[in-house]
Amino acid sequence: MEIDLGFLPTFWHWWILAVVLLGLELTAPGIIFLWVGIAAAIVGVVILFASQMAWEIQVLLFSALSLAVTAGGRIWWKRRGAIEGDPTLNRRGASMVGTICVLETNLTNGRGRARVGDSTWTVTGPDLPKGTPVRIVAVEGSILSVEVRD
């Protein structure tokens, strides 16, 4: 039984499919459409030079390339190593550890206020006079632990 499509897919059809798949990659999570889109683009290049290839062979080539490119892409991605994001993203206090700031008030009885950037924060640490530069060493909630800057 032979199926007649009514036309023979050309390289343009494969390249359009590649663009559609790469466009889907922008809207879908993961990276699966990237690899399949690359496979469609490769089939388009092959068809550019072998324009009379039967559509069945084109689909088989696309299927095989999709599997191969996806497997190769996964291996490459793992070897490349996932790029870790900023572990302190959305945790402003944690991102300030190690920052040098200046005490806005005296640090008495272990508590005071320090200016960090454009805001002031409650700090804990040894008793120190106003204006002393300190280093943030830890964060507990919205309270910063400080020590005298070396």
Image: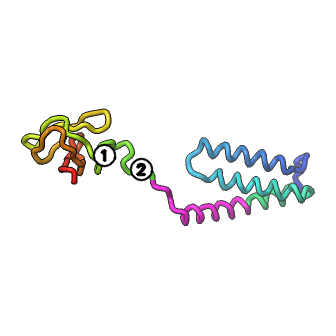
Given residues 143 and 3, the one toward you in this image is 143
Instruction: Judge depth for marks 2 and 1 and give the one in front.
Output: 1
The segment highlighted magenta reads: 64-84
Circle on res. 96: 1
Residue 96 included in the magenta stretch of the image: no
Mark count: 2
Q: Residue at x 12, y 37 (%)?
A: 106
Q: Is residue 116 above or below residue 18?
A: above
The quadrant of the picture occupied by the N terminus is bottom right
State the CA–CA distance, disc 2 to disc 1: 13 Å
Q: Position of residue 70 (x, y in %)?
A: 65, 60
Given residues 57 and 3, the one toward you in this image is 57
Q: Residue at x 79, y 50 (%)?
A: 14
Where disc 1 sits, the SS reads loop
Three-letter code, disc 2: Asp
Overall secondary structure of the magenta section: helix
Residue 76 included in the magenta stretch of the image: yes
- Give the residue number, with chain letter if any, for mark 2: 86
The reply to whether residue 118 is visible in this rendering is yes
Task: Give residue 26's quadrant in the image.
Answer: top right
Where disc 2 sits, the SS reads loop
- 59 relative to 32 in the view: left or right: right
Q: Position of residue 117 (x, y in %)?
A: 31, 37
The reply to whether residue 1 is visible in this rendering is no
The quadrant of the picture occupied by the C terminus is bottom left
